[in-house]
Amino acid sequence: MKNKTLIILLIILIGAFSRIIPHPPNFTAIGAISILGGLYFNKKHLAFIIPITAMILSDFILGYKPIISVYIAFLLIIPIGINIRKRLTHTSIFKASIYASILFFLITNFTSWLYNPMYPQNLSGLIMSYTAGIPFLMNTLLGNLFFCFSLFGLYELISKKKFIYINS
């Protein structure tokens, strides 16, 4: 059990590093880390604490002030990982990545509309906010897909010890 937790923590740290290195906007592993935490931590409190801690640490390193709607979005993504525990397949990971991206997009752009004075507080302003977020949605989706499959694959490879040995 300790090895499993250590492996997951290592993978989460690797994923959190994706926020620190130069990257396209929203192309990070945080969504995937939230799904991974929900999927692999049997103790639900760890599923919520570890991904958020990775966010807090990377925000601190980057000098960012935490944005509550972003944290809420990631907290709401964690149950997506919990939900696919019983039926973990390539398709469920793919769907989880899509759902997580859409959920993040809906929450963060809605709160952007609520609190950003550049958007009028009417339906037109809401549509403007969501339209402005479409490029970020694409990066979020691509990042979630890339990192979900990379991090899940890495975990499965390490935890199952399915290493390929090449004899020379």
Image (cartoon, rainbow, N blue to C red):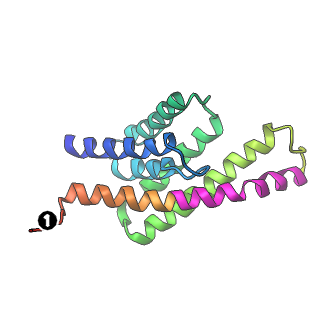
Q: Position of residue 33 (x, y in %)?
A: 44, 48
Q: Quadrant of residue 140?
A: bottom right
Instruction: Please report the residue visible at 73 percent of the width from the left and 42 percent of the height from the top.
Output: 111
Q: Is residue 132 magenta?
A: yes
Range of residues picked out in magenta: 123-143
| Residue lying at the far bottom of the rendered structure | 91
Q: Quadrant of residue 9?
A: top left
Q: Quadrant of residue 91?
A: bottom left
Taking depth in this image into account, of 137 and 123 the one nearest to the observer is: 137
Taking depth in this image into account, of 21 and 160 the one nearest to the observer is: 21
Q: Main secondary structure of the magenta part?
A: helix
Can residue 111 be seen from the camera position used here? yes
Question: How many marks on residues?
Answer: 1
Instruction: Please report the residue visible at 77 percent of the width from the left and 54 percent of the height from the top.
Output: 132
To which residue does mark 1 refer? 165
Q: Position of residue 81 (x, y in %)?
A: 44, 54
Please determine whether, in this image, residue 127 is positioned above or below residue 7: below
Instruction: Please report the residue visible at 36 percent of the width from the left and 62 percent of the height from the top.
Output: 86
Can residue 84 be seen from the camera position used here? no
Q: Secondary structure at mark 1?
A: loop
Taking depth in this image into account, of 43 and 120 the one nearest to the observer is: 120
Does residue 79 appear to the left or right of 68 in the view shown?
Answer: left
Taking depth in this image into account, of 84 and 17 the one nearest to the observer is: 17
Does residue 19 appear to the left or right of 129 in the view shown?
Answer: left
On the rendered image, what quadrant is the C terminus found in?
Answer: bottom left
Q: Position of residue 124 (x, y in %)?
A: 90, 54
Which amino acid lies under the numbered mark 1 shown in the image of this protein? Tyr
Q: Is residue 137 magenta?
A: yes
Instruction: Please report the residue visible at 63 percent of the width from the left and 61 percent of the height from the top.
Output: 138
At label 1, counting other C-alpha atoms closer than 10 Å, the crowd grade (few under 14, some 14-19, many 20 or more) is: few
Does residue 91 appear to the left or right of 113 in the view shown?
Answer: left
